[in-house]
Amino acid sequence: MGKKEIEDYLQEGIYGAKEINPDEKRKYLGTYRERVVLALSKAQVRGEKGLSELEEQIRQFPSTTLLMNNNMSLRFFKPYRELAEKLGISHTYVANREADSDYGLILAAKTAVDKEDILLTEAEQTEKEIEKKSWWQRLLGL
């Protein structure tokens, strides 16, 4: 073995295998940006926003996986887990103690989809919120 091969072997033994874009993988819960179909922030997951958009994207891309941020409370993921089970896609919790992602939930494909717009926009959120009125608003006709 040459000196370069031995050095690479030692470095790999100490620090682990070399990865391509490790920061990108940490940000997107262990997957690459090019594979992301839909990304929901932690606040959107807590507010159960994006369920209908998620269902639409799962129907459009049926061979996907739901990645959930394990640094959040698991109770927030119940409606998303139920939706994944109903539509027959796999779901998994991703824990990364070294770096915390801004995203609470990622819908990722197995191969690159290169979807330009992966975030749930504010317009879609407010549109869904308008549809959901509280019982007293419906009672008073507001």
Image (cartoon, rainbow, N blue to C red):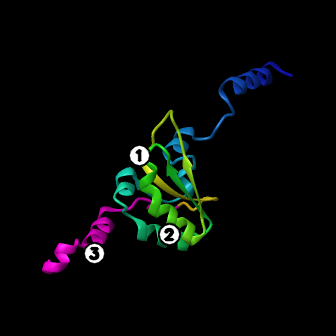
Q: Is residue 2 visible?
A: yes
**1 vs 3, front mark:** 3
Label 2 amino acid?
Answer: Gln
The residue under the point 29% across, 66% down is 123
Q: Nearer the viewer, residue 9 or 140?
A: 140
Magenta region, residue range: 115-142
* Quarter containing the N terminus: top right
Q: Tell me the SS state at disc 2.
A: helix
Q: Are marks 1 and 3 in contact (CB under 8 Å)?
A: no
- Give percent across and percent down for residue 37: 51, 61
Q: Is residue 13 left or right of residue 105?
A: right
Task: Assess whether residue 93 is covered by the magenta stretch.
Answer: no
Residue 116 visible? The answer is no
Spatial separation of the CA atoms under disc 2 and disc 3: 20 Å
- Residue at 68%, 30% in the rendered image: 16
Q: Kindly identify which numbered label has been placed on residue 131.
A: 3
Marks 2 and 1 close (CB-CB < 8 Å): no
Q: Is residue 124 magenta?
A: yes
The residue singled out by tag 2 in the image is 57
- Of residues 3 and 125, the one nearer the viewer is 125
Q: Quadrant of residue 63?
A: bottom right
* N-term-proximal mark, 1 vs 3: 1
Quadrant hosting residue 118:
bottom left
Percent position (x, y) of residue 106?
50, 55
Q: Which mark is residue 33?
A: none
**What's the residue at 54%, 74% (across, down)?**
59
The local crowd at label 1, few if under 14, some if 14 to 19, many if 20 or more residues have their Cα within 10 Å, is some
Residue 17 position (above or below residue 54): above
- The amino acid marked with disc number 3 is Glu
Give the labeled residue for mark 1. 102
Does the residue at mark 2 contact the one at mark 3 (Cβ under 8 Å)? no
